[in-house]
Image (spheres, rainbow, N blue to C red):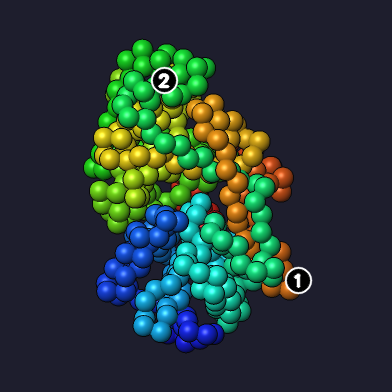
Amino acid sequence: MNAPFSPGSLNCRILQKENPEELNRIEAFVAEHADGSPFHCPAWVLAVAEACRHEWCYLLAEDGQGELQGLLPLHLIHSPLFGRALVSSGFAVGGGILSHNGQAREMLADQAWSFAQRHSFPSVELRGGPAPDSQWQVKDDVYSGFVCDLADNEDAQLLAIPRKQRAEIRKGLKNGLTVEIGTDERERCNHYAVYAESVRNLGTPVFPRALFDTVLDRFGADADILTVLEGEAPVASVLSLYHQGTVMPYWGGGTWDARRSRANDVMYFALMNHAREKGCRKFDFGRSKRGTGAWSFKKNWGFEPEPLSYAVRTADGEEARDVNPMSPRYRLQVALWQKLPLSVANRLGPVIARGLG
């Protein structure tokens, strides 16, 4: 379905079908744009839609010659628990408006809101990217991102890490842990088992395993799993994305035993070295909420926090969704979830988590 819209010399239309030629154009635009991310890519948009059964679309801003000047990927989230929202991008920490100019940016924001109104979505969430005009609420004081250059070799990488954290890594390296990297069924099973236990311990529902599988399948060589084992037991594991010379450890966690063996420290250090061997130059530690343990953990590695900007627009009389597990409104639910048997949490979690978007 195309929806023409043309202030000035730009037009905006909607792509809702998996057209290979169109998706290749989008892929090339994201790859060439300095602010492009995995969450703008068709691989991410289609993986989320396929695995979590959410509809998707791209808003495309084009000039008079049909050249892309901006885009906005959207997932149409429907949840009986968390409500309805247009989200860019679903299950991502980024993926907001990607454009070459302010006109394209404002056009895409306006079209996203028009789409939301036509389809009765009470809110639109833009994760990252330049903020639209004043009709959008912008928050840049909640989350921080952490990105750092990788060193030239393993020894230099270890020395680049602050002394206290470097000591933890060295202790972990003496514990006889082994590291496996891949994307086959063994790695996928080990990763899901570790990740599911990790998020249960944090009090949040685990995503469907299909989401991890589909992301790995869609991204191909640009995604993999690194797992740390103690003997035969996986104790820490991370699924990482690779984009334009940057590695992003995205879904990672560890069991209770990982703390004792310092497997998480070994895992991230091993990933830095693995990423460098794959040709990466930067390590993107992802986002964390200010004041949390994860935020402090990343600072301990020598990463400097950078504010992340998120924009939300809501219909009159409506409130923006609250899907942050650290929100006070979810304190009781988080405490109860942490006490669930893992088998129960793994059955219920994917049903709930699909609606988070």
Expressed as whole percent of the image width and height from the top left, the position of residue 24 reads: 29, 68
Q: CA distance from mark 2 to mark 1?
A: 54 Å
Mark yes or no: residue 317 visible.
yes
Q: Amino acid at mark 1?
A: Gly
Q: Nearer the viewer, residue 356 or 91?
A: 91
The residue that appears at 65% across and 51% down in the rendered structure is 140
Percent position (x, y) of residue 50? 37, 63
In screen coordinates, is 223 left or right of 1? left
Number of the front mark, 2 or 1: 2
Sooner in the amino-acid sequence: mark 2 or mark 1: 2
Quarter of the N terminus within the rendering: bottom left
Q: Amino acid at mark 2?
A: Leu
**Residue at image point 36% right, 81% down:** 66
Relative height, residue 356 to residue 199 (above, below): below
* Residue found 32% across the figure and 15% down from its top: 176
Q: Are marks 2 and 1 in contact (CB under 8 Å)?
A: no
Q: Secondary structure at mark 2?
A: helix
For the point 34% across and 53% down, the residue is 215
